Amino acid sequence: MYKVLLVDDEFLISDGISSVVNWSLLGTELIGIAQDGLEALAFIERQRPDIIISDIRMPGMDGLQLVEAVAEKYRNISFIMLTGFTEFEYAKTAMQYGVKHYLLKPCSEESLVQAIGELVSEKRELNDHEHFVQTIQYNLERVLPHAKEYFLKELVTNKTYGVKEWKYFGELFSVQFLGQRVRLLLVEIEGEHEYLHLFAVKNIAEDIFHNPILSTTVRGHLLVMMEDTMSEAQLFRNIDEIRATFTRYYRYDLTMALSEPGELPQTRQLYMRTIAYLNHRFYLGEGSLIMERDVTPIEERDVPEFEYDQGRLVTAIQAGHWQDAGAELNRIFQLLVDLRYDISQTKSYLIQIFMEIIRLSGAADMKRYMDRLPCMIETSTLHSFQQFLLTVAKQITLRRYEQQRSRQSQMVQQVKQLVQKRYQDETLTLQSIAGEIYMNPDYIGKMFKKETGEKFTNYVLTYRIQKALELLEQDGNYTVSLLAEYTGFGSNWPYFSKVFKKYTGFSPSEYKKAIT
């Protein structure tokens, strides 16, 4: 039963809570009621409750001060805070001490029972985890000196071991080694972990495989030797169970290599093959189960040269087109997966591609990217290098895109300014503006439409009609021919009238009448 302390200076609330909750049904026991934080703190030092239900506002020491004081000395005590609506944001400061349960006063019986139930579940799960870890640690202390580990380690690393040694250790361990067919399972823990975790995997594997022939830790790996008696389907289920159990408690993934069946004299050769299999997690990814069928030696394959379109990748990045650049990079990585060269050769290609990409960034960014390269060279998988390179390429491509867009916006703004300056000039054309700013007219037209949503010619006509309207607003006596001449239509007043009516819905004379 988990012990509960109730802290509230309002008798009606503390009495109500103590009487409505079925404490035993929740696996708890109400061991006391305190009226303020100081009284509660003294009670805690004597009784050590597991759960405290406390009001926020109390005389003397309030609820938040109580949480802070308890958190410094008793980290295993959990809190449920009772708070008024106006105090709720204030109560959230208790989060820094691990408080996750807040109930607004007056709280319902259902919400209080739910909060208590969640805390009880969390504590039970934590206790189960601690018990599991303690059990493993106890067993590890007993098996560390075991001679079986030493024998298996020597068997796979010592070339001089033979029939004489197998016979001797077989009699010592009461195990019949000769004539058996065996498999080896080599396990590597991914990520930065403690050496103790290897022994945790070892215990889990021995439990799931029901005491295999031998198991040991060797060169940072776990090695398990088992008799080749079960079907592959059952073998795979056991291996999956090892990974699931270990990951559930320790949050690390496992990469494993499984040998083909072989005779005991072949043990060292089987071990060397599993070591080679593990190297292929660079291509197959962390968390894989790697077997002989997953690894085809390069000398047995007709491997073509690694070729990719460098220009396509560089051009896409320079143009700021991330969709094209990302697709090209993914295609390159898929090609490397398919070719599956020697890992050092693949990494040399990756470094070459990386250098081509970061050259497209500024000097400061290039140095920052270069500083990250040594760490990535040591990466254990092609997938992690791919994610790194995609991230770098995307940053550079999007930065290029923003630069291109800024330059395009500046160019479009410059074109608009020239139109505003020269709109009275009937020789104003896209070609004449292109010659003035030394750019290709087709490119200007395309960028102008992309930036503004309208063609250059439409923009010029609209601007000229707007100027004609301004002239008419200033003086309604302007003739159509003068309006055409002053707004860049020259002597072609019939065309001006046609455009005017298209944009306004009125002929110039109709518009003049409407505004007078």
Image (cartoon, rainbow, N blue to C red):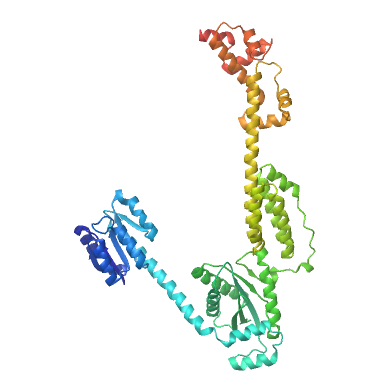
Residue 21 visible in rendering: no
Where residue 29 appears, x then y in whole percent?
A: 28, 70
Asked if 372 appears above or below 44 in the picture, the reply is above
Looking at this view, is 108 or 407 the one in front?
Answer: 407
Q: Quadrant of residue 81?
A: bottom left
Asked if 362 appears above or below 414 in the picture, the reply is below
Looking at this view, is 426 or 41 the one in front?
Answer: 41
Looking at this view, is 438 or 255 the one in front?
Answer: 438
Residue at (70, 49) in percent of width and height? 359
Q: Quadrant of the N terminus?
A: bottom left
Where residue 452 appears, x then y in whole percent?
A: 61, 30
Residue 351 visible in rendering: yes
Q: Is residue 273 left or right of residue 226?
A: right
Asked if 159 appears above or below 365 in the picture, the reply is below
Where residue 101 appears, x then y in whole percent?
A: 35, 58
Q: Quadrant of residue 20?
A: bottom left
Where residue 159 appears, x then y in whole percent?
A: 71, 84
Residue at (72, 26) in percent of width and height? 434
Count of numbered marks: 0
Q: Residue furthest left?
A: 11
Q: Quadrant of residue 472?
A: top right
Asked if 226 appears above or below 312 in the picture, the reply is below
Residue at (68, 52) in percent of width and height? 329
